[in-house]
Image (cartoon, rainbow, N blue to C red):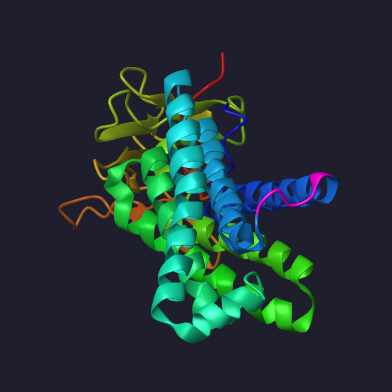
């Protein structure tokens, strides 16, 4: 299966954040090394905008890496996302946005002008926050180029929240430690908050499968989803014709024993089709889906990745597992 796709567990909710944190910290480290080797090649008033632009570029490039590898994007998408989304909007745009915010503060507030003139990098949080927020807004715009306008509000909100959180962490850390550690923690915060709020690995990249865990057909698995991503159904039993998953009758499986269906909105359901035990087991829960003749429709329960299913005729049984696996396979 696609080795670039994370397992369908809680880890997929933080996967993007881990990537954006990594790239943001790497870009911060590269800036520190460059300044350490070559020295600052710009005025002190540009330290803040350049720092913000570099962090924003790092966050957006992390979004490019996450989206491009998970969804196996083409070369044209990579070029557009890196040059337009990350470099031009996420990097240069964020730096210019922070510079404009500082410039307006200098014109509007005399106390801000005095603060920036003395120490532009470590100025008061009530002035520096505007530059960080401007950079965060451009981070969101860069991610819109990467992900598309469909999730614009999430991306803009995540970028803005990341810039705001980074400014707060930067200020508190600067007061406690020193500007070096503060800048590094700001990079971690910006990447982490934006990655957590912007998006998670979408469930649309996965398909539901039924896997046999016992008996003579151990290890066999069948995909529930159809090729066109519409509603589909998989039937399990030992009836000799027309079944999606045929299992031997001497292993506790009835002619029509279980149905696993996926709806058009991506929900998976298990339905009992036999009078014999059809048990779905999960953490702190056990559901028997055996068919009740007094009811007009079969019993059903939602299925989640890792649910165990036991089919039995009262004497012996077969164990199945419902599991979510990546759709895309690497040739």
Image height check: is 154 above or below 93? below
Magenta-drawn stretch, dominant element (helix, strand or loop):
loop
Position in image of residue 40 (x %, y %) = 73, 52
Position in image of residue 216 (x %, y %) = 61, 25
| Residue 11 visible in the displayed image | no
Task: Give the residue furthest to the bottom.
Answer: 111
Q: How many marks?
A: 0
Position in image of residue 265 (x %, y %) = 26, 45
Q: The N terminus lies in which quarter of the figure? A: top right
Q: Nearer the viewer, residue 203 or 74?
A: 74
Q: Quadrant of residue 167?
A: bottom right
Q: Residue at x 34, y 43 (%)?
A: 274
What range is drawn magenta here?
Answer: 38-42
Q: Residue at x 84, y 45 (%)?
A: 37
Q: Nearer the viewer, residue 66 or 47?
A: 47
Q: Nearer the viewer, residue 106 or 237?
A: 106
Task: Give the residue furthest to the left.
Answer: 296
238 displayed left or right of 131:
left
């Amino acid at each position: 299966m696609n080795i670039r796709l994370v397992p369908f567990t809680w880890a997929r909710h933080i996967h993007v954040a881990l990537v954006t944190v990594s790239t943001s910290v790497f870009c911060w480290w590269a800036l520190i090394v460059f300044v350490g080797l070559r020295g600052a090649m710009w005025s002190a008033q540009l330290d803040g905008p350049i720092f913000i632009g570099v962090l924003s570029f790092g966050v957006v490039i992390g979004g490019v890496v996450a989206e491009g590898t998970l969804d196996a994007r083409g070369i044209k998408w990579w070029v557009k996302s890196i040059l337009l989304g990350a470099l031009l909007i996420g990097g240069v745009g964020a730096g210019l946005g922070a510079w404009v915010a500082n410039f307006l503060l200098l014109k509007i507030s005399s106390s801000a002008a005095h603060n920036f003139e003395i120490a532009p990098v470590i100025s008061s949080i009530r002035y520096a926050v505007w530059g960080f927020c401007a950079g965060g807004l451009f981070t969101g715009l860069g991610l819109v180029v990467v992900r598309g306008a469909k999730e614009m509000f999430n991306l803009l909100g995540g970028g803005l929240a990341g810039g705001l959180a980074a400014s707060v962490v930067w200020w508190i850390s600067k007061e406690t430690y020193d500007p070096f550690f503060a800048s590094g923690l700001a990079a971690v915060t910006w990447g982490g908050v934006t990655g957590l709020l912007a998006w998670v690995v979408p469930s649309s990249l996965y398909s539901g499968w039924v896997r046999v865990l016992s008996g003579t057909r151990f290890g066999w698995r069948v995909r529930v989803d159809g090729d066109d991503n519409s509603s589909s159904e998989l039937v399990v039993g030992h009836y000799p014709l027309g079944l999606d998953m045929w299992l031997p009758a001497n292993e506790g499986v009835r002619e029509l024993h279980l149905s696993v269906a996926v709806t058009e909105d991506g929900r998976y359901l298990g339905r009992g089709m036999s009078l014999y035990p059809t048990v779905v087991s999960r953490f702190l829960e056990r559901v028997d889906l055996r068919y009740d003749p007094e009811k007009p429709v079969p019993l059903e329960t939602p299925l989640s990745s890792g649910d165990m299913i036991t089919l039995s005729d009262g004497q012996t049984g077969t164990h199945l597992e419902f599991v979510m696996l990546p759709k895309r396979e690497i040739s």
